[in-house]
Amino acid sequence: MKRNGNLFKKLRIGFSVLVTLAATGGTPAVMVSAQEATYDLEATLDIAFASNLTTLDPHLTTNQATRDVGRQIFETLLTLNENYEVVPSLAESYEISEDGLTYTFFLREGVKFHNGDTLEASDVVASMEKWLETSTQGKANLAGAEFVEVDDLTVELHVTQASLIVPYVLADQAPFPAIVPAESVASADETGLTEFVGTGPFQLAEWTPDQQIVLERFEDYVAREDESSGLGGKKEALVKEVVFHIVTDTSTRIAGITTGEYDIAFDIPLDNAAQIESLEDVTSVFSPAGTATYVFNNAQGPFADPKLRKAFNAALNVEEALLTAYSNPEYYTLDSALALPDQTDWYSQAGSDQYNQNNIELARQLVEESTYDGEEVVILTTRDYPDHYNLAIVAQQTLENIGVSVRLDIYDWPTTQEVRKDPANFDLFPMTFAIRPTIHQNPFLDSKAEYAGWTNSPEIDELLVAITQESDFSAAKPLIDELQAEVWNYLPIVKLGNYTDLAAVNHQVEGYSELIGPILWNVGKTE
Amino acid sequence: MARYVAKRLLALIPVILIVAVVVFMLVQLTPGDPASILLGDEADAASIAQLNAELGMDLPLREQFMNWFNNVLKGNLGSSIFFKKPVTEMFWTNFKPTLALALYAEIIAVVLALVFGSLAAKFRGTWLDHAVNGFTVLGISVPSFLWALILVMVFAVYFRLFPSSGYKDLSNGFLPFMRYLTLPAVALGLVQSSIMTRITRINMIEALESPYIKATTARGISSRKVVFKHALKNAFLPILTVIGDSFGGLITGAAVVETVFNIPGIGQLIINSIERRDYIVIQGSIILITFIYLSLNLVIDILYGVVDPRVHLESEAS
């Protein structure tokens, strides 16, 4: 019996060790006194970030992860307020010449970079030229444009053709024209910037690839005086540090926000919304995230025939499709317009009679009338984005219901991008698009854009140009309506609706909001 | 002994060459490329092609392989396309958490296995034996990531005893280091211990039946000494094999548990590199893992000779 006693004694000791280990944990100590209201100004904001950052060069890529982190440390000449209208940011103001060919930007004085240098026109010119070189929107909408230094605080933009949408293009969010020092532009290589110096309220402290990005308050930040609205106006870093923890696994993000390890968790799947709602000290924040669509291969294959596109559109039950993709009507709105209702300059209900017809009879008839002769239609999708995948299933069932045979090709996301390059590989894919400041920035409209889909509508091309030639938006409105109607006629895509994404925010965090991505200035932690 | 080690090390080279070729082909033949990932979804084909050319991706495959492998032989595994850091640096940074996790899991597994395997063998047929058997079956059938999720739910979210994810290295102190690693190590260790317990039990049963053990007991040596000092030592060789296999498997295959617990180990490094199509890092990491795994096998083989002096590692002729 002694022998067993010894063994059990050892087991008990081992167990106590484990319990001691567990007990040494606990809530981290909260620091220091606040100076303003009830916020702890020395606090750290711990964020569970869903995407892995591949680059911090905002000129280079449309990746949303780069946008989300980059916008906290970089600033632009112009940006968007809460109504998606263009407002000056690093520019104090700007003027447009009579003929619309010259834009003059007057820079704010005394703005500091994170390395201590003062912002000057030469930095703006170098940054904007770099952005023009690599951004798809810059190249598409500002072909042949040139930025010129006039004096230390004045920069001119010379465009080859007057266009109403130039300020919107300059306020684009991904890639966004971050203003960096001219030296940073000079030291950049083919994969982008090698140093990340901006003018924003936070500066980059540390980037450990695949693990975390740490930003800290930029003490010498020069803020605007006007009231903050959306991405514009006064910005204050109300926390000392923002840590983006890269947590790609959903259950890990949810566990972390539940236990309080993270203050904010991004990209909570809508399926888990009820679970987040049930947590006492966590708030759900829903923000417009983008538009859900189906994109056709307009260049070759069965859908090159507009009749078949119309057939698919006629058969679609949009309610069902969006419910399948987003699981709860609270998380999406049905809308035929390409723009959000808040984007008053661009929002148009034209063509909505073509939307959500749910008319199987008509669809089958249109299939008859089309050139479709029984070949297999290939739907391309990925499981990496569950909403894409669910929309693909709905499309498959809809098509099979009207007598079209379907094959579903499922790959991982990078492979779908590769496969999409060749029009022989697919006929349809579901896609979500981020909110853009203008309709023009949707890649599936312009025939010159070469976006997988290869839209080729002279009418759409003409309207896109005509809109830019108008003097203001009230004059452009009838043309925007025509464009929207033509999109429903030509059907380069089928717009389904607008969806929201869900961020879980700890109740100690105040002031959090999103506008095409998270805004982490003016966000404080109470004690 | 030295000649044996030298021979084994030389034998590594053809293995690594084969692995290099296979990995290179697999990675290059997979659709997707780093430029598309870097530039994003809406980049135009011309920009992507240009960046790929600048990165050297448009050279013929044989040339790309020769360039890369020549450097590997010189000890230069290249640098990440995305982060400009040398592959060796990125690998070793990520290797430390994986090694720590594997060691911790292995210790848990070995302790559990030796203790309960031996006890089950000693008390064969009793409730203890049945309980251990039942538990090992459960441990083998339930995958490690499911254990991980259950442990997180119970101990991290419900009881708030341990953190639900993350990793703190030793610079933050030994106690936090252990706290963050405990749940993942238990998740991995439970599965490994099940296999090891069964092997231990079988080998211990055999050892305990042998005549020399009966003789030892007859001489009055305490039961505990008989089991743990005499029988276990002699039954140890097959157990050592399992330990070696299991440790190798833990080093190379903890990827899922690393993902659930967000531990920046080599599993995560390789998964992330594959998602980004960071070819150089994928290729270099696989080469390094192969090297580590083969070296581990070599160490185990040498340990055979240490644990059991009757084992001759080299052939009689030498």
Image (cartoon, coloured by chain):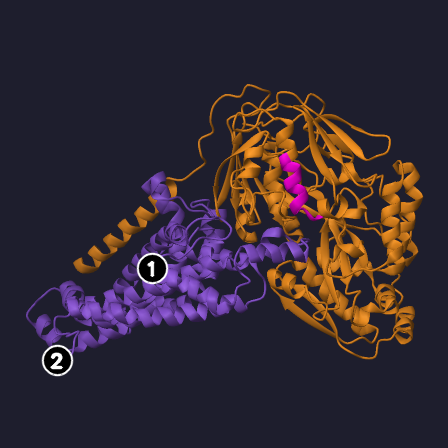
Chain colours: A orange, B purple
Which numbered mark, 2 or 1, is in the foreground of this view?
1
In the rendered image, the residue lying farthest to the top is A35
Up the image or down, B151 lies above or below B199; here it is above
Q: Secondary structure at mark 1?
A: loop
Residue segment shown in magenta: A126-136
Q: Nearer the viewer, residue A155 or B110?
A: A155
Q: Amino acid at mark 2?
A: Glu
Q: Residues within 10 Å of mark 1 (few under 14, many from 20)?
A: few
Q: Main secondary structure of the magenta part?
A: helix
Q: Secondary structure at mark 2?
A: loop
Q: Earlier in the sequence, mark 2 or mark 1?
A: 1
- Spatial separation of the CA atoms under disc 2 and disc 1: 36 Å
Q: Name the residue carrying label 2.
A: B316
Q: Name the residue carrying label 1.
A: B74
Q: Nearer the viewer, residue A202 or B77?
A: B77
**At 70% across and 32% down in the image, what residue appears?**
A148
Where in the figure is residue B147, as x and y percent of width and height? 45, 59
User: In the shown orientation, is residue A71 left or right of residue B99?
Assistant: right
